[in-house]
Image (spheres, rainbow, N blue to C red):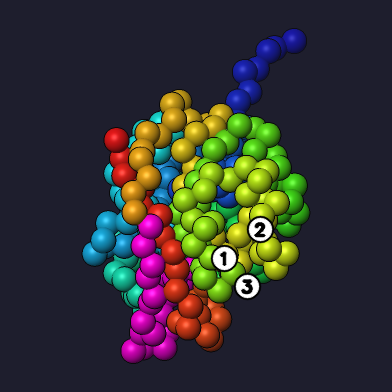
């Protein structure tokens, strides 16, 4: 009887990396699975300020994350408050380039937002990509406890004043933070209540070294064109521009 060495080539995928906790946990789960080969971390960055879209984290810290994760980084340079057309053009150009390298799947850390998932799947299908959601529909109370139990460490870098006050920004997420959250706030900030920067955990070869800088308040102006992409924490809501955001600046050491 002949012996055959049978091995399966992994499916090439990009991972949509926001720098925060949901991305970190989703990536952890994907790396436990032998199905995918992560070819790139894909992150959108504000072209003018060189900070991660929505999170406000400096590119230098993003690059340190990618180095510690041992994964190549692909940055999409996005104008501030772009039209949906402009955003989608950059995305299509980037994904087409990656498709030519054999990439077929795009992985996200989304958990609950059905409309956002449908939008992603629709846009990706146009280019011939499939979307993957490792955390989909898992209760956020379970996810945040798993995140902490695994030894991940993350700091809150942006809060939406619609939901949270200044005191929550700049805090490391632990049990006290979770207990302090108001009842109307999702424990993972899935509705744009807060965003984070993950600086340590089982997927990192070493912690990201940074110091906490100033806390600043920013309010976005409503774009002249109606069709703008969601560059604030939650621009899907009609009154989003009535609320501002508290950001905690992190400075690479």
Residue that numbered label 1 is attached to: 164
Magenta segment: 215-233
Q: Decide if residue 104 is in sight here.
A: no
Q: Residues within 10 Å of mark 2 (few under 14, many from 20)?
A: some
Magenta-colored stretch includes residue 219:
yes
Residue farthest to the front? 167
Residue that numbered label 2 is attached to: 181
Report if the CB atoms under discs 1 and 2 are less than 8 Å apart: yes
Residue farthest to the top? 1
Query: Quick check: 142 left or right of 167?
Result: right
Query: Quick check: 177 left or right of 207?
Result: right
Mark whose residue sits in front, 2 or 3:
2
Q: Of label 1 and label 2, which has the lower sequence position?
A: 1
Q: Compared with residue 176, is residue 190 higher up or lower down, i.e. above or below?
A: below
Residue that numbered label 3 is attached to: 115
Query: Quick check: 223 left or right of 2?
Result: left
Mark whose residue sits in front, 3 or 1:
1
Residue at the image position 40 percent from the left and 34 percent from the top:
208
């Amino acid at each position: 009887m002949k012996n055959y060495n049978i091995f399966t080539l992994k499916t090439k995928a990009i991972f949509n990396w926001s720098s925060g906790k949901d991305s970190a946990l989703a990536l952890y789960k994907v790396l436990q699975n032998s199905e995918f080969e992560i070819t790139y971390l894909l992150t959108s960055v504000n072209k003018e300020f060189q900070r991660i879209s929505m999170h406000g984290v400096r590119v230098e810290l993003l690059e340190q994350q990618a180095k510690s994760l041992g994964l190549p980084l692909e940055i999409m340079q996005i104008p501030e408050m772009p039209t949906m057309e402009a955003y989608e053009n950059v995305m299509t150009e980037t994904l087409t380039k990656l498709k030519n390298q054999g990439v077929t799947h795009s992985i996200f850390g989304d958990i609950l937002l059905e409309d956002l998932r449908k939008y992603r799947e629709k846009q990706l299908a146009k280019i011939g990509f499939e979307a993957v959601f490792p955390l989909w529909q898992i209760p956020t109370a379970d996810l945040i406890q798993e995140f902490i139990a695994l030894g991940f460490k993350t700091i809150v870098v942006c809060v939406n004043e619609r939901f949270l006050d200044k005191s929550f920004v700049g805090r490391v997420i632990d049990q006290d933070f979770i207990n302090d959250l108001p009842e109307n706030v999702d424990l993972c900030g899935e509705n744009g209540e807060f965003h984070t920067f993950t600086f340590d955990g089982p997927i990192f070869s070493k912690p990201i070294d940074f110091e906490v800088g100033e806390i600043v308040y920013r309010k976005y102006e409503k774009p002249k064109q109606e069709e703008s992409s969601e560059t604030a924490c939650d621009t899907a809501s009609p009154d989003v521009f009535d609320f501002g955001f508290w950001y905690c600046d992190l400075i690479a050491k």
